[in-house]
Image: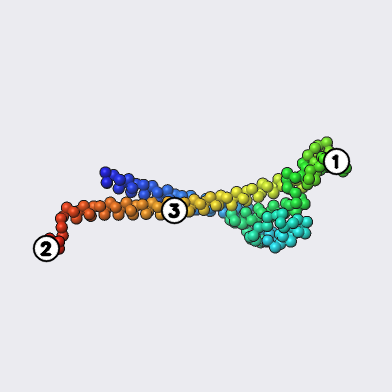
């Protein structure tokens, strides 16, 4: 039974080591793929994408710095080539969108441009109306005119979500590498203990069969 447990420990160690190596390889490959996908988009931070620059720009647009989440990382003139920069770039994009809409988000603006003199009850807080009856009609299409400011958020949300997802994916890949290292070290440690116990027991058994050593016999 002792040998069965020993071989079981060795098998478990090998499994842990194999999973650890596999997790490290998968994590490194995932991290590399995420960075390659970001880099091939050739995104470069605009000159105002610094904490100081974006704060001054937001204040000029009438936004309060306390109402916006100013990134702490500068990506001005830098290629967006990893998850951290992608997340920072997405944060700057959101501030740009707020500047374009006067500080209002997608849900705070009406779907259509409102007619002049539209009742306040039919207006959204950020301007426009969601009631087609009070919308400006496009003379060409004869349809309510879309609120361009509101549509800015559609584009911003799509791009920022993709960038934020790449940040999350890179973090998952990093976690996979860390877990792989932990599994690898655990497997190696478990293997060393198992082999030590196995050969240690064997040597003790051999000594006990040989009997007392010569020194003890002489004494």
- The residue that label 2 is drawn on is 218
Separation of residues labelled 2 and 1 (CA atoms): 114 Å
Residue at 62% x, 50% y is: 164
Residue toward you, 182 or 144? 182
Residue at 28% x, 51% y is: 198
Q: Is residue 141 above or below residue 161?
A: above
- The residue that label 1 is drawn on is 119
In the rendered image, which quarter contains the C terminus? bottom left
Secondary structure state at the residue bearing disc 3: helix
Residue at 68% x, 47% y is: 157
Dot 1 and dot 3 residues touching (CB under 8 Å): no
Q: Residues within 10 Å of mark 1 (few under 14, many from 20)?
A: few
Q: Residues within 10 Å of mark 2 (few under 14, many from 20)?
A: few
Residue at 45% x, 52% y is: 180
Q: Nearer the viewer, mark 3 or mark 2?
A: 2
Residue toward you, 70 or 46? 70
- The residue that label 3 is drawn on is 182
Dot 3 and dot 2 residues touching (CB under 8 Å): no
Q: Is residue 212 left or right of residue 79?
A: left
- Could you tell which of marks 3 and 2 lies nearer the N-terminus? 3
- Determine the image quadrant of residue 145: top right
Q: Residue furthest left?
A: 218
Secondary structure state at the residue bearing disc 1: loop
Residue toward you, 75 or 175? 175
Secondary structure state at the residue bearing disc 2: helix
Q: Nearer the viewer, mark 1 or mark 3?
A: 1
Residue 113 position within the rendered picture, expressed as x and y whole percent measured from the top left: 81, 43
- Could you tell which of marks 1 and 3 lies nearer the N-terminus? 1
Separation of residues labelled 1 and 3 (CA atoms): 64 Å
Residue 29 position within the rendered picture, expressed as x and y whole percent measured from the top left: 50, 51
Residue 140 position within the rendered picture, expressed as x and y whole percent measured from the top left: 83, 39
Q: Residue furthest right?
A: 117
């Amino acid at each position: 039974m002792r040998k069965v447990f020993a071989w079981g420990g060795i098998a478990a160690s090998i499994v842990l080591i194999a999973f650890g190596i596999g997790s490290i390889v998968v994590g490194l490959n995932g991290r590399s793929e995420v960075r390659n996908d970001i880099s091939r988009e050739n995104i470069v931070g605009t000159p105002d994408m610094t904490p100081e620059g974006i704060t001054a720009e937001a204040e000029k647009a009438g936004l309060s710095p306390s109402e916006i989440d100013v990134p702490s990382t500068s990506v001005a003139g830098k290629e967006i080539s990893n998850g951290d920069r992608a997340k920072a770039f997405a944060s700057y994009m959101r501030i740009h969108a707020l500047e374009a809409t006067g500080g209002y988000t997608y849900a705070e603006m009406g779907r259509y441009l409102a007619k002049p003199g539209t009742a306040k009850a039919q207006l959204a807080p950020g301007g426009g109306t969601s009631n087609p009856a009070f919308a400006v009609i496009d003379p060409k299409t004869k349809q309510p005119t879309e609120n361009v400011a509101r549509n800015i958020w559609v584009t911003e949300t799509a791009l920022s979500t993709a960038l934020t997802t790449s940040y999350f994916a890179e973090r998952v890949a990093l976690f996979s590498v860390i877990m792989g290292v932990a599994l690898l070290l655990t497997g190696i440690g478990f293997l060393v203990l198992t082999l030590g116990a196995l050969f240690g027991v064997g040597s003790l058994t051999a000594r006990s069969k040989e009997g007392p050593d010569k020194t003890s016999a002489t004494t």
